[in-house]
Amino acid sequence: MTREKGRKTIAQNRRARHDYHIEDTYEAGLVLTGTEVKSLRAGRASLVDGFALIKDGEVWLQNVHIPEYTMGTWTNHMTRRPRKLLLHREEIAKLIAKTRESGRTLVPLSLYFSDGRAKVEIALARGKREYDKRHDLADREAQRDIERALRRRR
């Protein structure tokens, strides 16, 4: 059987980019069980309520929903169990230092397979205020209007 090449996206958290200012991103591996991998290969997962915590020098992904594998038996996994993230020790040390600052959190942005291995992209993020969200929305709308006008002019 041939190995997979490239990147296959399973799930994205679009809401995170709306609710947070993304400061830095990290790619982390996931510790998964067999039925979780099969469910992910079927393209089923949700990152909407997910976040990451640092406990005892380890990073844990919390509240990410990977539904049960339909063909699984009694060995099926729990859908919202904590999952360990695999990062380098230096990266974890940086994250510990940065998350101690107030208002910063770790949010999953996307879940994907990279060369056949399950990965998650987590971001160090700071929450946006309501007026920041309105300002971003207004900027996006203005940019769309400019592009529309340029297209009509051509």
Image (cartoon, rainbow, N blue to C red):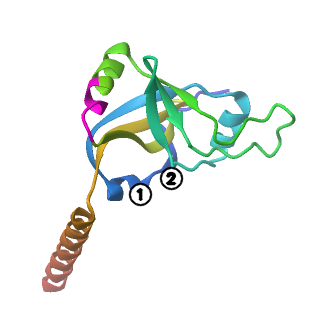
- Circle count: 2
Residue 6, position as x, y percentages in the image:
46, 35
The label shown at residue 103 is: none
Q: Is residue 99 magenta?
A: yes
The residue lying at 69 percent from left, 46 percent from top is 67
Q: Check disc 2 and give the amino acid type.
A: Val
In the depicted view, which residue is nearer to us: 40 or 23? Answer: 23
Would you call the spot at circle 1 few (<14 residues within 10 Å), some (14-19), or many (20 or more)? Answer: few
How far is the residue under mark 1 from the one under mark 2? 7 Å
Q: Residue furthest front?
A: 102
Quarter of the image with the C terminus in it:
bottom left
In the depicted view, which residue is nearer to us: 13 or 119? Answer: 13
Q: Check disc 1 and give the amino acid type.
A: Arg
Q: Which residue is mark 1?
A: 15
Mark 1–mark 2 CB contact (< 8 Å): yes
Q: Which residue is mark 2?
A: 48
Q: Is residue 30 magenta?
A: no
Would you call the spot at circle 2 few (<14 residues within 10 Å), some (14-19), or many (20 or more)? Answer: some
Residue 56, position as x, y percentages in the image:
46, 17
Left or right, residue 28 beside residue 18: right
Left or right, residue 92 beside residue 45: left
Mark 1, secondary structure of its residue: helix
Left or right, residue 154 beside residue 11: left
Residue 9, position as x, y percentages in the image:
50, 45
Residue 22, position as x, y percentages in the image:
28, 46
Question: Which one is earlier in the sequence, the residue at label 1 or at label 2?
Answer: 1
Instruction: Provide the residue span drawn in magenta.
Output: 97-102
Does residue 40 appear in this view? Answer: yes
